[in-house]
Image (tube, rainbow, N blue to C red):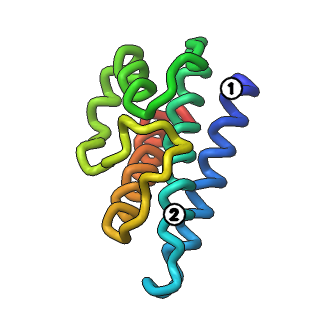
Amino acid sequence: MDSNADKLFLTAKKKLNEANKELYKPEEDIVAYSVCKNSQYAIDNYLRGFLTKKGIDSSGLETISQLYEACKKTNKNFEKIDLTDFQCIYHTIDSKYCSEYAKVNSCFATADNLDTFLRKEKII
């Protein structure tokens, strides 16, 4: 595996684990922003990792929507990943969009589904 893609996948997994640990806290103790941002960074890194592994430059792609579309062009199976509940798909990662518990769960579920998909496809 390409070492740059490897680094992106490792970062994605680390961020997904950080989000997961936060979700195991009682609901009143959960820092929603932390879960959402870690989930967003995981998704971003998984998608960039895939593109990097395929030799595609993702530096001009700023949103998860742009990354996702590029991934679908390369591998049609990405259409299996449902991003309809992922409400910040068109926002840049550094935006302050996350705040509600329901949105946080949606962000984490999307990141986790992407991790599962990439493993089933034997990409990671």
The secondary element bearing badge 1 is classed as loop
Say which of marks 2 and 1 sits in front: 2
Q: Where residue 118 appears, x then y in whole percent? A: 47, 38
Q: Which residue is mark 1?
A: 1
Relative depth, front residue between 113 and 18: 18
Q: Quadrant of the N terminus?
A: top right
Relative depth, front residue between 122 and 16: 16
Residue at point 56%, 43% (across, down)? 94
- Residue 83 quadrant: top left
Give the amino acid type for the residue marked by disc 1 in the picture. Answer: Met
Check residue 33 in the rendering and tell me which mark sits there, or answer none.
2
Residue at point 54%, 54% (across, down)? 37
Q: Where residue 60 appears, x then y in whole percent? A: 55, 16
Relative to 112, residue 43 above or below: above
Q: Is residue 85 left or right of residue 7?
A: left
Relative depth, front residue between 98 and 73: 98
Relative depth, front residue between 1 and 40: 40
Residue at point 62%, 63% (across, down)? 18
Q: Earlier in the sequence, mark 2 or mark 1?
A: 1
Relative to 54, residue 104 above or below: below
Residue at point 49%, 52% (across, down)? 96
Give the amino acid type for the residue marked by disc 2 in the picture. Answer: Tyr
- The crowd level at tag 2 (other Cα within 10 Å; few <14, some 14-19, many 20+) is some
